[in-house]
Amino acid sequence: MRVVEWKRKKGVGRILPEWTMENVLAKSERTKLKAVPVDGKKPASSWQTAAAEDAKIYAGLKGHKQKVPIAPFYSMYNISDLTFAKFRVAWKRMASQMAAVVLSNIKTEYGMKRIISTDTTSLFAATSKEEAHYLCAVLNSDLVDRYIRSFSEAGRGFGAPSIMNNLAIPKFNTDNKTHLELAALSEQAHGLVQDGKPVGEIREKIIVTVKKLWNIA
């Protein structure tokens, strides 16, 4: 992975409101999953310089053991090709309610870059934009939020990937009008939030449509 230096806005990384991308830590260009060593060369950015100094301190802490001794200090773990899928649905962990967003590419001053969520989020990898928005609509529905909060306590344990084992979300089907309707509603909600407009009306439509998805009167 080659990290592109990025100016972070104040507060970025703390919150992932539904339908938005405020929890983005960095825009990265994926070349391979194995970290590329610096090989003693001068750091290419201020990020690398600061990270190198932090690593010296961290390595000296009592009890610290590097997972892979031969790996560079900035190596990342528990990631795979799914982490960099073109379309993903991410939701925040350690929260008090479900809030999901569709992540893909974004235009930046460095060109089109893939958005990578922080380690305080969970995610689904989707095969298409429509499938991603379908899943996002379901997760952001009031029905799913209330169900998850009924057994997942707010805080560090909320929003863990394992909570999805309790949701029987039907597989996305392009021939299913309800699935396509949910996908369209989610895409509309994303657009409204980016324009600073309320999504109350869309939210109500999603609640009704998700009930129809699960045949709930």
Image (tube, grey):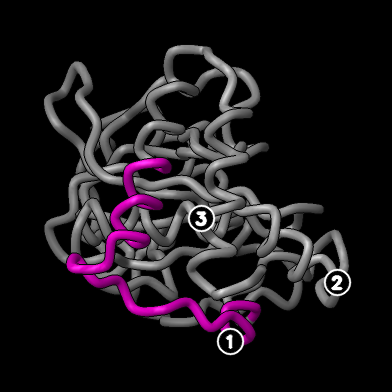
Can residue 116 be spotted in the picture?
Answer: yes
Earlier sequence position, callout 1 versus callout 2: 2
Q: Where does label 3 land, which residue?
A: 209
Q: Where does label 1 land, which residue?
A: 165
Q: Return the x and y of residue 45 as percentages of the image width and height.
A: 30, 29
- Determine whether the residue tagged by mark 1 lies in a helix, strand or loop: helix
As shown in the figure, which amino acid type bears the numbered disc 3?
Thr
Q: Is residue 196 left or right of residue 37?
A: right
As shown in the figure, which amino acid type bears the numbered disc 2?
Ser
Earlier sequence position, callout 3 versus callout 2: 2
- Determine whether the residue tagged by mark 2 lies in a helix, strand or loop: loop
Residue at coordinates 54% horizontally, 50% vertically from top-left?
100
Q: Nearer the viewer, residue 118 or 20?
A: 20
Can residue 56 be spotted in the picture?
Answer: no
User: Residues under labels 3 and 1: Cα distance?
Assistant: 22 Å
Q: Where does label 2 land, which residue?
A: 150
What residue range appears in magenta?
163-186
Residue 175, located in which quarter of the rendered image? Answer: bottom left
Q: Return the x and y of residue 108 as percentages of the image width and height.
A: 22, 22
Residue 13, located in which quarter of the rendered image? Answer: top right
Quadrant (top left/top right/bottom left/bottom right) for the C terminus = bottom right
- The answer to whether marks 3 and 2 mark residues whose Cβ atoms lie closer than 8 Å is no
Residue at coordinates 56% horizontally, 55% vertically from top-left?
91
Q: Is residue 196 left or right of residue 49?
A: right
As for residue 164 lying within the magenta part, the answer is yes
User: Residues under labels 1 and 2: Cα distance?
Assistant: 15 Å
- Determine whether the residue tagged by mark 3 lies in a helix, strand or loop: helix
User: Residues under labels 3 and 2: Cα distance?
Assistant: 21 Å
